[in-house]
Amino acid sequence: MAKYIVGITGASGSVYGVRVVEELLKLENEVYLVLTDNGKDVLEYELDMDFNKWIEHLRKQRGKLILCNRNDMFSSIASGSFKTDGMVIVPCSMGTLSKLSNGITDNLLIRAADVMIKEKRNLVLVPRETPLNSIHLKNMLFLSNLNVTILPPMPAFYHRPKTLDEMVNSTVGRILRSLHIENQLYHEWNGKNQ
């Protein structure tokens, strides 16, 4: 069973975080979930769902869910000696991205991401902001130069999505591929006639 950390912040796009967690559990992985306070609030607002009921549902999945308190700096994911297979922050607010870029590890979410960078492990950030200003771009470039994957949720249309769900799945599939997880949510381009 592989171990993944998923962070959800207060940026718009909670559906991506929810779907990533669900897919990782469906694939029988161990998921360490960390949410900011705003991440939880935005998730409930955007998806019109009760967070605690969602967590109850997730605990019945095949994988294993560990809900981490963002203030618990004694959590296993705060240490480089705790090996994981990857981490994704989805959606990633510009505040979280900025703190990470500047080494401000004032909560477990950012500390866990900082550990991924220092241990040279796979870290994927899914920033959900538009338009991007020069500060956002500078922070993203800085992190990209540290081998952090910056994966904005930009929909692809070459597979001719018919529903919003198909568009979300395509992005979730790309996120999973960036974590080196094969899946059927994302379809590679095989040419116009295929």
Image (cartoon, grey):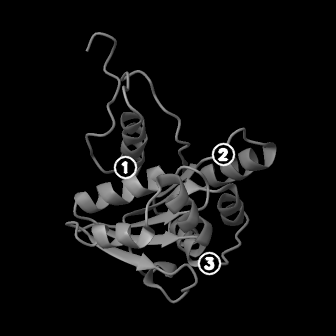
The residue carrying pointer 1 sits among few (fewer than 14), some (14 to 19) or many (20 or more) residues within 10 Å by Cα, namely many
What is the distance, in whole Å, between disc 2 and disc 3 at their CAs? 22 Å
What's the mark number on residue 107? 3
Q: Is residue 132 left or right of residue 163?
A: right
Farthest top residue in view: 193
Residue at the location (29% across, 68% down)? Answer: 57
Query: How many numbered marks have been drawn onto this rendered protein structure?
Result: 3
Q: Is residue 59 left or right of residue 71?
A: left
Q: Earlier in the sequence, mark 1 or mark 3?
A: 3
Farthest bottom residue in view: 74
Name the residue carrying label 2: 129
Is 125 drawn above or below residue 56 in the view shown?
Answer: above
Residue at the location (58% across, 70% down)? Answer: 36
Name the residue carrying label 1: 176
Give amino acid for label 1: Leu
The residue carrying pointer 2 sits among few (fewer than 14), some (14 to 19) or many (20 or more) residues within 10 Å by Cα, namely some
Is 31 drawn above or below residue 129 in the view shown?
Answer: below
Residue at the location (31% across, 73% down)? Answer: 56
Query: What SS does tag 3 mark?
Result: loop
Residue at the location (19% across, 66% down)? Answer: 62
Find residue 34 and report its horizontal and vertical position in percent. 49, 72
